[in-house]
Amino acid sequence: MAGRTVTRADLAEAVYQKVGLSRTESAALVEAVLSEMCDSLARGEMVKLSSFGSFIVREKGERIGRNPKTGVEVPIEPRRVMVFKPSNVMKARINGQDMADEAE
């Protein structure tokens, strides 16, 4: 089930529709939020959005990988990767459950 991609423009339009800022102000707000999130993650900080999830930067150490075509082993450099961990509220919403149902 392939859905459509939500773009920055879509987010800005949603802010425009729901908050009532101008389209220019809405686009600037979306850009500012995304920029702050990117800057925080680049500094290695966790970004947590309540009822949505957490973006976490993890360190991956050096390891040996293998070229699947040739079978030759090659070292993979250490690097940082970003991981998204959805909140329980988001997991329930994706699965069509209401969190109020969970409490009963």
Image (cartoon, rainbow, N blue to C red):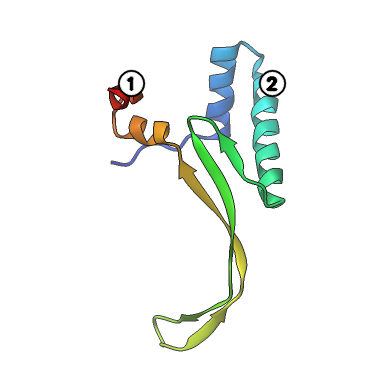
Please identify the quadrant where the N terminus is shown. top left
Residue 17 vertical placement versus 97 (above, below):
above
Q: Secondary structure at mark 2?
A: helix
Q: Position of residue 42 (x, y in %)?
A: 69, 51
Q: To which residue does mark 2 refer?
A: 24
Crowd band around label 2 with a 10 angstrom C-alpha radius: few (<14), some (14–19), many (20+): few
Residue 90 vertical placement versus 13 (above, below):
below
Residue 13 picture quarter: top right
- Work out how far the residue at label 2 is from the one at label 1, CA to CA, in angstroms: 38 Å
Q: Position of residue 12 (x, y in %)?
A: 59, 25
Q: Indicate left or right for 5 with 98 as reference.
A: right
Along the line of sight, the residue nearer the viewer: 85 or 70: 85
Q: Indicate left or right for 24 with 8 as reference.
A: right
Along the line of sight, the residue nearer the viewer: 5 or 81: 81
Q: Indicate left or right for 103 with 36 as reference.
A: left
The tally of labels here is: 2
Q: Position of residue 27 (x, y in %)?
A: 65, 26
Residue type, mark 1 in image: Ala
